[in-house]
Image (spheres, rainbow, N blue to C red):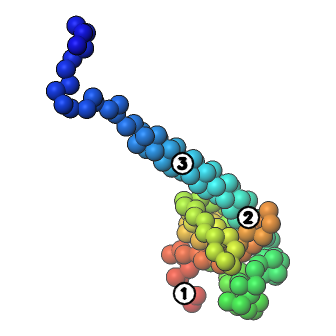
Amino acid sequence: MGMGSVPAYGYPPPKAKDRSWVWIVSAVALSLFILMGSCYYKLGREGAESDVAVAEFHKQMNAGECDAIYRDATPEFEKAVTMDQWRTMCEGIPKKLGAHQRSSRQQVGFNTTINGSFVNANYSSEFALGPGQERFSWKKDGKRLRLVGYFVNSPKLLTFDK
C-alpha cells in the first residue's frame, strides 16, 4: 500500500452520485414552461379574435342587422333559437339598453372537443342607457368565429313596460 492510498477495509469505493434525476426534473420543468407559454399565447390570440367578433356583433346589432347575425351563426345556435325568437331578443336589447358603446373583456376560455373548438368570453359592456354583462360562445370556423350562444344581463332588462 502506497502513501497516498487509503485502505478500503473491505468496503467498495464510493460510487459517483447518480444525478439523472436532475435531468428528469429539468425536462419536466421545461415541458411545463413550454405548455404554459403556449396556453397563454392561445388565450391571448383567442381573446383578440373574440374581441373582433364581438365588435362586429355589436356593429350589426346597433345597425339592426339581426337577420345577418342569425344567418352567420352556427347550426347549434339556429337549433336553440328560432329566427323569430332571435329577432325579438336582438331588437329588444337596444330598446332597453340603448346602443352599444364599448365592451371590456373580463374573461376568456377555450375548449376543443370532437364537435370543434370553442371560445367563451365574458364582457363588461356599456350601453347608452346603462351597463350590462355579456357572455359570448363562439365556434372556430377556419380563421373566424361563429356565434353559438349569446347571453346578456343588466338591471335595465328587468324593467317592465307600463
* Left or right: 143 as drawn, with respect to 35: right
Mark 3: amino acid:
Ser
Mark 1: amino acid:
Phe
Q: Which residue shows up at 21% across the image and 17% down it?
A: 6
Please, is residue 100 above or below residue 114 in the view? above
Q: Position of residue 103 (x, y in %)?
A: 63, 60
| Quadrant assignment, res 68 | bottom right
Q: Nearer the viewer, mark 1 or mark 2?
A: 2
Q: Which residue shows up at 75% across the image and 80% down it?
A: 74
Please state which of residues 43 and 116 is positioned toward the viewer in this rendering.
116
Q: Which mark is residue 31?
A: 3
Decide which of tag 1 and tag 2 comes sooner along the chain.
2
Mark 2: amino acid:
Ala
The answer for how far apart the CA atoms under marks 1 and 2 are is 31 Å
Q: Which residue is mark 1?
A: 160
Q: Nearer the viewer, mark 1 or mark 3?
A: 3
Decide which of tag 2 and tag 3 comes sooner along the chain.
3
Which quarter shows the N terminus?
top left
| Quadrant assignment, res 104 | bottom right
Please, is residue 18 above or below residue 90 in the view? above
Q: Nearer the viewer, mark 2 or mark 3?
A: 3
Decide which of tag 1 and tag 3 comes sooner along the chain.
3
Q: Which mark is residue 99?
A: none
Q: Which residue is mark 2?
A: 53
Q: Which residue shows up at 74% across the image and 87% down it?
A: 78
Which quarter shows the C terminus?
bottom right
Determine whether label 2 and label 3 are within 8 Å by CB.
no
